[in-house]
Amino acid sequence: MARKTAQDDPLAPVTLAVGQEDLLLDRAVQEVVAAAKASDADTDVRDLTPDQLQPGTLAELTSPSLFAERKVVVVRNAQDLSADTVKDVKAYLGAPAEEITLVLLHAGGAKGKGLLDAARKAGAREVACPKMTKPADRLAFVRSEFRATGRSATPEACQALVDAIGSDLRELAAAVSQLAADIEGTVDEAVVGRYYTGRAEASSFTVADRAVEGRAAEALEALRWSLSTGVAPVLITSALAQGVRAIGKLSSARGGRPADLARELGMPPWKIDRVRQQMRGWTPDGVSVALRAVAEADAGVKGGGEDPGYVLEKAVVTIARAARSRGRA
């Protein structure tokens, strides 16, 4: 197999995503899966943890199919694979199957270094997914996110966003997406200030998480702090909507592993696990009530009500009560 680089075709036989930044690891997987499904909409995706990849499992997954279907096999935390399974993977690297893309996610440390070296020697396409511990790295990430959306942002705006959000790349990415959707023209420091300044201690997502967990007092405390430090009310209604919709989507989905549900619902696996914990106590009627509350709050903060703070407090209390609807049934 010829040596690949991170800029080559994501359908290379083997992709090696190296690092500990979960968002970047998930994106590396999503890029491969998207390319595979663009080539074949019926692509079979298998997303596996080390305990699910036992000796012999990889051979079964990569054996020729009667229907010659395209397949993506994702192996997470490859550094934790057992010695026997590592032997299987190394053997596969020497003769990868056609129409199959193997994605190995590896933390990049000393543990499991033999597999890491073998994949590189075999010419695996490599994607760097390092933890971004330096402010300069996070600043570069924000700039690249704005470029990816096709929007421009001033250097001062990018820095202000990093200062306000902190080190969580998922929140930084979500903030860029929100600004790109809401703001026309160049995003400047004043815009970031209106949306985010002072929100490092309490975000719109914190408000939403506490509300859908039924923790009304904590949700209200986070809401009041967010509003007092300049978080735009529209961001809070957006976060509430995302939280309630996630509960509704997962509660109506068929059971299965997080990886399977993630593909079905379009959520990353980590979010499936979080929403599963949050949805205890919810009923279908509770979801309906909460969605109506979010819709009313959204209308209120966009001019339909006199006091956005009161509108949001009412919505938070309603959602928190709906989260405990099963216990009252």
Image: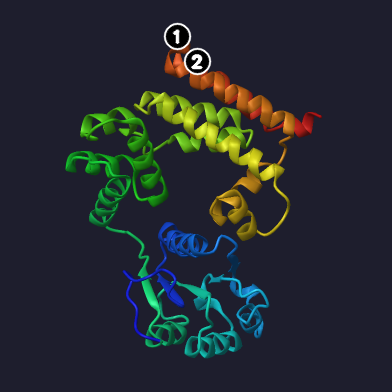
Q: Quadrant of the C terminus?
A: top right
In this image, 18 relative to 314: left or right? left
- Eyeballing the image, is 287 above or below 41? above
Q: Amino acid at mark 1?
A: Glu
Residue in the picture at 50% in, 89% down: 95
Which quadrant would residue 42 be assigned to in this image? bottom right
User: Residue 278: where, in percent of width, then height?
Assistant: 63, 42
**Is mark 1 in CB contact (under 8 Å) with mark 2?**
yes
189 or 35: nearer the eye? 35
Determine which residue is flagged by label 2.
Answer: 310
Residue indicated by mark 1: 306
Position above or below: 39 against 294? below
Q: Residue 219: x and y, percent? A: 54, 30
Kindly state the secondary structure of the residue where label 1 is placed.
loop
Mark 1 Cα-neighbour bin, 10 Å: few <14, some 14–19, many ≥20: few
Residue 69 image position (x, y, % from top left): 60, 71
Hey, what amino acid is under mark 2?
Answer: Tyr
